[in-house]
Image (cartoon, rainbow, N blue to C red):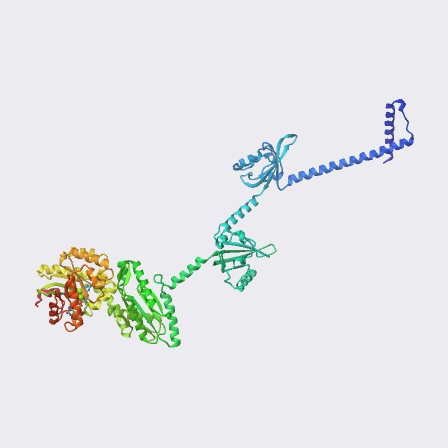
């Protein structure tokens, strides 16, 4: 304490003391000694010091308060969050700079305005709800509108407070944080997680402790494990046991090296069933580039594998018969050639073609055709050894490779067995059909040393078998090759001939054996070849049949014969029944009856003067069609002949079912009668049967009087043959001198 202060204090104290004394009652008046005064002064000094200290504290507190206010104000102003004060009606009474920045307006354009002004219209109901809330703290995400039309996504938090100076009214302190980025991020995450969950590919995430930490829905579906069953487990639980440990070792090494692995892997489902999957593993690294997670994306490829197998099947197998196809056959053939070259062995090829398959397909439909092919494939497969290869080359062609055959006769034996197994009828669409096969054989190395030549030569030999009369086999020889070239020329010439009117008809009379008169004539085709001259049906009908040309040729013959009939009529010549041959191919055409009606109409031919000749092989493939067609013919008055009877395979019971009028006994049974007892017996039986069935009977190829007599004796109705007349030009008929 300073001296001056001391003096002043002393004076003041004295003054106080004097005032005190004056105010005291007299009897209690007391005077202080110096010592006492000194003590009082000391006390007062202590008190003074205490007061000053209190003042100092007060000042310090004021400074602290002021500093705190500054700090608060600074915090308030520069906070990264928008702060607002709202009154109970939601009017902004104060806001910080951050909020102004967020909204893009000055304080003066914010304060005194309702907070709703800065919030998307669509969200005003939420705002209203918040402001009416009874809670002390409420928050919600709201869309805020900024100056210039922009907006941001904000977290709006309200803390209830009191209006300053009006303790009873509610007011709000509000904080607004721009969470647009978090919101967008959350949205993105949500979309990604939705995408992962809805993707068809299974996803499994494994952490760096090799524990499964995430699986999606597709995973659950594919594996059959639920999320809870696998989370925290080692992915080893999925192993199928189909891979060695080195497989997994290699996989993890690749992942460690490159961060990724993809490939096919077999895993096991919850049910225990093993399945193949295509797995893609990629590594997620942490900040220090250490692997943190492994993401496995996989899909069950069982179906793809099945498809792959199926495609392989399709690529190498015929879909109808399931036999190897040409592709696979060629592979095996090439291998066999190599083997035969190395070991100096022989082998054989059998090339097979179904006779008249096309007719079956055309008339019974493709599914029945397919059924037939399957059945043929089954029969053929049943005959072969394990090492033999049978393939379908396409259409109705099959081929067999008989590897390492020592003797040529082995192939012949197989061919015989094949023909034998084909002789049983086929059940197709509820009926029985006789289907035959022609087989051509070629042999390595005699008939070719490369696959192409061997197949081509077996094919050529097969055509020869067909020419020989089908239902037979033939081995290749060099002359055949020359013939096949002729065949190509022949086909071309025949097409040209058809266009150039090179076809003609000759007519052969049939003689009634009772009256000795001409009861009918048969139209027979001839071909005037520009170089070869007159070509007989046996040299071209088979080819026409094979190429389908026979249909056009058959209709041409029908028109031609019917027109000729009109000419004879005009000339006053009565030829009786005019019969025309219908090939199997033509007979199986579904529009045959319609065409017949049309041609009859066009030519003016009386239908009761027309006869049609069909062979058993035309009648057999589709009995229903045969019956319907023949019935239609008979209804029109047309006479139905079964030609070459006895040469086919038709059963007597079948013949009985057919609506026919005349049986023509095949020439082969007439040829050697009466000398050959077998033929005699057959001819007699046919005649007797025809009589029982009430059918007329015509004998073909009657050349001798002995034959004629025999036929007459046995009750044959009519005969046709060189004995009476060879087939002649139309004009030749009126000059015929026919007498028995
Ligand atoms: P096909 O219908 O059985 O005709 C009878 C065949 O026997 C005819 O042969 C005829 O010339 C022959 N022939 C008749 N009498 C005798 C005889 O006493 N001795 C001998 N050796 N032969 C005799 P062609 O004219 O060569 O006809 C052969 C076959 O060609 C016919 O047999 C028939 O299946 C077919 N053909 C002929 N013309 C036509 C036709 O216009 N259309 C169809 N689809 N086939 C026809
Ligand atoms: Mg005939
Ligand atoms: Mg005949």
Residue 123 position (above or below residue 339): above
Q: Is residue 502 visible?
A: no
- Residue 124 in the image, given as x and y percentages of width and height: 54, 35
Nearer to me, 727 or 663 = 663
Q: Quadrant of the N terminus?
A: top right
Q: How many marks?
A: 0
Residue lying furthest top in this view? 26
Q: Is residue 343 left or right of residue 566?
A: right
Q: Quadrant of ligand 2?
A: bottom left
175 is higher (above) or lower (below) than 558: above
Task: Choose top left, top right, bottom left or bottom right for residue 698.
Answer: bottom left
Would residue 4 be found to the left or right of residue 669 on screen? right
- Find residue 296 and report its horizontal and vertical position in percent: 52, 56
Nearest to the observer: residue 242 or residue 115: 242
On the image, the x and y values in percent for residue 32 come to: 90, 28
Q: Position of residue 252 (x, y in %)?
A: 55, 61
Residue 540, quarter of picture: bottom left
Q: Quadrant of the C terminus?
A: bottom left
Farthest residue toward the bottom? 344
Quick one: 600 or 683, which is closer to the camera?
683
In which image quadrant can residue 21 be found?
A: top right
Q: Residue at x 61, y 56 (%)?
A: 288
Viewer can see residue 14: yes
């Amino acid at each position: 304490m300073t001296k001056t202060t001391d003096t002043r204090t002393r004076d003041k104290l004295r003054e106080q003391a004097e005032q005190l004394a004056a105010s005291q009652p007299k009897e209690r008046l007391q005077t202080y000694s110096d010592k006492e005064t000194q003590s009082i002064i000391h006390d007062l000094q202590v008190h003074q010091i205490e007061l000053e200290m209190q003042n100092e504290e007060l000042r310090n507190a004021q400074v602290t308060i002021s500093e705190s206010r500054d700090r608060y104000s600074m915090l308030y102003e520069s906070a990264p969050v928008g702060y607002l004060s709202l009154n109970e009606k939601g009017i902004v009474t104060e806001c910080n700079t951050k909020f102004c920045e967020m909204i893009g307006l000055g304080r003066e354009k914010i304060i005194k305005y309702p907070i709703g002004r800065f919030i998307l219209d669509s969200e005003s109901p939420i705002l209203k709800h918040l402001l009416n809330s009874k809670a002390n703290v409420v928050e919600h995400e709201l869309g805020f509108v900024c100056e210039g039309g922009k907006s941001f996504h904000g977290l709006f938090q309200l803390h209830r407070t009191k209006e300053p100076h009006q303790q009873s009214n509610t007011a709000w302190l509000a904080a607004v944080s721009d969470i647009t980025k978090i919101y967008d991020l959350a949205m993105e995450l949500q979309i990604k997680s939705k995408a992962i969950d809805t993707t068809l590919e299974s996803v499994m995430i494994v952490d760096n402790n090799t524990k499964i930490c995430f699986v999606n829905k597709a995973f659950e579906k594919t594996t059959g494990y639920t999320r809870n069953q696998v989370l925290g487990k080692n992915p080893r639980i999925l192993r199928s046991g189909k891979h060695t440990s080195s497989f997994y070792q290699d996989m993890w090494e690749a992942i460690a090296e490159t961060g990724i692995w993809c490939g096919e892997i077999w895993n096991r489902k919850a049910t225990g069933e093993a399945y193949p999957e295509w797995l893609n593993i990629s590594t997620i690294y942490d900040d220090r580039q250490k692997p943190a997670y492994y993401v496995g994306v996989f899909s069950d490829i069982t179906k793809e594998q099945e498809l792959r197998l199926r495609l392989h099947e399709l690529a190498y197998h015929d879909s109808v018969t399931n036999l190897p196809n040409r592709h696979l056959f060629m592979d095996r053939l090439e291998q066999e050639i190599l083997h035969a070259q190395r070991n100096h062995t022989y082998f054989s090829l059998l090339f097979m073609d179904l006779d008249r398959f096309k007719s079956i397909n055309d008339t019974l439909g493709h599914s029945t055709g397919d059924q037939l092919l399957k059945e043929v494939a089954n029969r053929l497969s049943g005959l072969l050894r394990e090492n033999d290869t049978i393939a379908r080359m396409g259409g109705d062609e099959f081929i067999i490779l008989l590897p390492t055959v020592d003797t040529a006769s082995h192939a012949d034996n197989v061919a015989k067995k094949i023909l034998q197994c084909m002789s049983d009828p086929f059940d197709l669409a509820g009926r029985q059909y006789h289907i035959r096969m022609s087989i051509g054989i070629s042999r390595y190395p005699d008939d070719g040393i490369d696959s192409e030549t061997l197949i081509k030569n077996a094919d050529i030999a097969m055509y020869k078998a067909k020419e020989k009369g089908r239902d037979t086999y033939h081995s290749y020889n060099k002359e055949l090759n020359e013939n096949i070239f002729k065949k190509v020329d022949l086909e071309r010439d025949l097409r040209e001939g058809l266009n150039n009117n090179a076809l003609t008809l000759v007519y052969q009379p049939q003689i009634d054996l009772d009256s000795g008169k001409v009861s009918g004539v048969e139209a027979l085709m001839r071909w005037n070849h520009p170089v070869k001259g007159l070509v007989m049906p046996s040299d071209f009908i088979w080819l026409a049949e094979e190429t389908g040309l026979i249909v056009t040729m058959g209709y041409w013959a029908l028109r031609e014969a019917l027109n000729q009939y009109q000419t004879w009529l005009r000339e006053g010549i009565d030829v009786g029944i005019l019969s025309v041959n219908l090939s199997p191919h033509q007979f199986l055409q579904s529009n045959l009856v319609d065409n017949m009606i049309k041609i009859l109409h066009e030519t003016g031919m009386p239908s009761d003067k027309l006869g049609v000749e069909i062979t058993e092989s035309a009648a057999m493939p589709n009995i229903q069609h045969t019956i319907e067609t023949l019935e239609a013919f008979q209804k029109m008055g047309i006479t139905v002949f079964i030609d070459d009877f006895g040469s086919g395979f038709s059963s007597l019971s079948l013949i009985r079912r057919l609506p026919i009028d005349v049986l023509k006994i095949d020439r082969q049974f007439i040829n050697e009668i009466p000398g050959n007892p077998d033929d005699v017996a057959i001819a007699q039986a046919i005649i007797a049967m025809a009589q029982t069935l009430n059918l007329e009977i015509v004998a073909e190829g009657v050349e001798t009087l002995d034959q004629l007599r025999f036929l007459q004796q046995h009750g044959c109705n009519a005969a046709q043959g060189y004995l009476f007349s060879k087939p002649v030009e139309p004009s030749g008929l009126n000059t015929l001198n026919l007498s028995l």
